[in-house]
Amino acid sequence: MNVAPPAPTSLTGVLERIIFFNEENHYTIAEFRPDADRAADPAAKVTIVGALPGVECGETLHLDGEWTRHAQHGAQFKVTAFKSELPASVYGIRKYLGSGLVPGIGKVYANKIVDAFGTDTFRVLSEESGRLRDVAGIGQKRAGSIKQAWEEKRTERELYIFLQTYGVTPAQCVKLVNHFGPGAKQVLLHEPYRVAREIDGIGFKTADRVAINLGFANDAPPRLDAGLIYALETLQEEGHTAFREADLVAYSANQLETNSDLVTARIQALVAGQALVRHAAPAGPGAAAPLPGSALLQLPHNDRAEQKIAEVVARLGRVGSGLPPIKADAAVRWAEDKAGFAFHELQRTAVRHALAHKFTILTGGPGTGKTTILRALVEILKAKQVRVHLAAPTGRAAQRLAETTGGFASTIHRLLKYDPATGGFTSNESHPLATDFLIVDEASMLDARLASALLQAVPARAHLLLVGDTDQLPSVGAGNVLKDLIAAGAGPVTRLSVIYRQQEQSGIVTTAHAINAGDAALPPAVTDLAGVQAWSDLTFVVATDAEDCLRKVTALCTEFVPRLWPWFDPVNDVQVLAPMHKGVAGVANLNATLQGALNPHARGLRGPAAEYRPGDKVIQLRNNYDKNLFNGDIGAVRSVDAAAGTLDAEFDGERHTFERGEFNDLVLAYAISIHKSQGSEYPVVIIPLLKGHFMMLQRNLLYTAITRGRKKVVVVGEPAAYAMAVRNSESKQRVTHLQAKIAAVRR
């Protein structure tokens, strides 16, 4: 029977039954009998969930964690850490051996062995295994295999105990053992920082905690080296591909709590060993030498990525065009006749530049005519039988590009074709794309590594046009590629500034441009949802606090959108975009609330982060080349199989099966972060915006969110938060070395 959960966040008891076990990450769902409840009710059991590597039925477990409540299965204890002991009672030993952990011992032989040796069973298996032959049915061969299996299990068990002793979580234990095997203990003892370098999900902080516990000195060279690499990786996550040496020394010395001179010395050693790349800075004003500490340091992969971008841009400028002869002015007039209206001179210039130059850039905000240019350019090139390829960083952006131009478009990853065998793209510098003209939309999303892979695949005689809005959020990955290419004068740039959609009185477009101009005047605002007008494409709904914001966002999705705009589907056509993940009006809580409101009745399948139900909207969190799915792809759960522990989800018309071990790749997507929305557009966008989001409130964040809405945008929040975002134009400057590399290859 299930018992009401006790208050403590730690439990001790016996593992009774393993209901589910994932071989890949050791995620376990099990029945557990707490010692505290055994005297009152010997049959009392609770459900425990979490990563429990190496445990078996019958063991005594000491668990730390928290109580949660599952909508379908009730109270569960979510394990964050545990210690295990071999069972001491005959009952526990019988259950432990009979669980099938030792090949050759099933329930029958487990009972025979325990009947023979009782509580002395484990000592006999470890020290006097020859006595197993005294048990009926166990001969020399079976006794030998039982002994070998027992020793292997004991070694694995001791390894898990050792790892957890030094602060390694159960989930991290699994990764360590999977990666290093039986040698994990030796690696941890002698090379703890190697763990941070080689295993995703185990960072410097975990490795450092273990190393310090093992007695490594605070200023030991391996610690300082690992700390410096970690510092640059942390800064990389903030968008930097390079960092000024003096700033890195100060940052790392502070993080490592050590002397800056020692850090400087280790930088020299890492540069000498090619683990870091140093670039001399230009001389200071009136000085004959660079200023001290002004050199830039890079991780080698970022240095290579930017170098390749610079080299390809230079190559495109040197090699002649492969296009057939095209009279640009006549082609523009032909495109105008097909479109049925005259282009603005800036639009004509953009088409001429793209036809005349191998590498060009087109930039501008919403409603400035980028789509008109791309459609005209594709039609001209097709008429001349030129091989045109269209690409964008996300699936939704590629789909929109195809719809607006009439050409075929794909994501960059699909265009380049990832090869799992080599860990790289099939299309590359040695095997370029079979194209004469490549157009890449949403180029502001290109980080240095993806841009490098893409540009290397461009044939020497082909043209490349990058299209993007430099006022949007920068790429999620490190780099500032589009802005750097423009600033470096890598090719002709057409900046569109005339707003055409303004003539249609688009509140979305005019508000977006007002935000960019720093105009903090609130859009048309209402205090109650009843004030939202069906004809308006942008409305600000005032919320008094986070709870009021959550209520109004939920009501918009469930009641007002279906009533005001019944042609929009509340799940598929409406996207909630939140500045932050945490909080009452954060992504996580919005998803839980909206799932309950929009998809309340379906029976689902529990994963580590959420329950997945048929009909749920989900988003892919990492690139999965085997499934041809990429970070940011949005799909829908179609079915779940509780018995098999799988779910089927559909993305862009293709169904994919996800095992439990892959559930971490998916999260609910009724609400997503504004960063995740880059490159996508949605018919209806709802944006919660509160002063509590102050850490994220920036002009380019709000601008990006507003411009994701194709038909309708509703901002729900506090007017002061809107003003805070518009006035905060000081987005962090990213440190890169791309402009310097472009200048260098020209010399």
Image (spheres, rainbow, N blue to C red):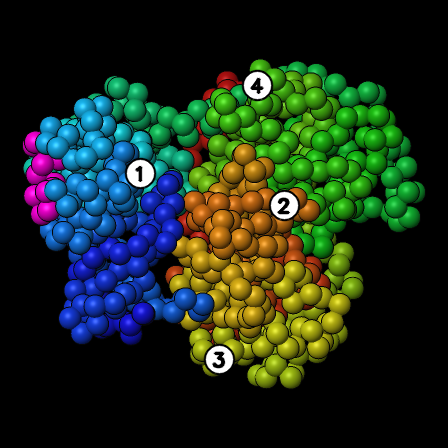
Tell me, yes or no, if residue 511 can be seen here.
no
Q: Callout 3: few (<14), some (14-19), or many (20+) C-alpha neighbours within 10 Å?
A: some
Residue placed at 59% from the left, 50% from the top? 649
Secondary structure under tag 4 reads: loop
Tell me the distance, in whole angstroms, between the alpha carbons under discs 4 and 3. Answer: 54 Å
Residue placed at 46% from the left, 41% from the top? 477
Residue labelled with disc 3:
548
Asked if labels 3 and 1 touch by Cβ distance under 8 angstroms, the answer is no
Q: Quadrant of the N terminus?
A: bottom left
Secondary structure under tag 3 reads: helix
Residue labelled with disc 4:
429
Residue labelled with disc 1:
175
> Magenta stretch?
117-129
* Residue 616, horizontal then vertical, whole percent: 57, 60
Q: Between tags 2 and 3, which lies in front?
A: 2
Tell me the distance, in whole angstroms, between the alpha carbons under discs 4 and 1. Answer: 34 Å
Q: Earlier in the sequence, mark 4 or mark 3?
A: 4
Nearest to the observer: residue 728 or residue 273: 273
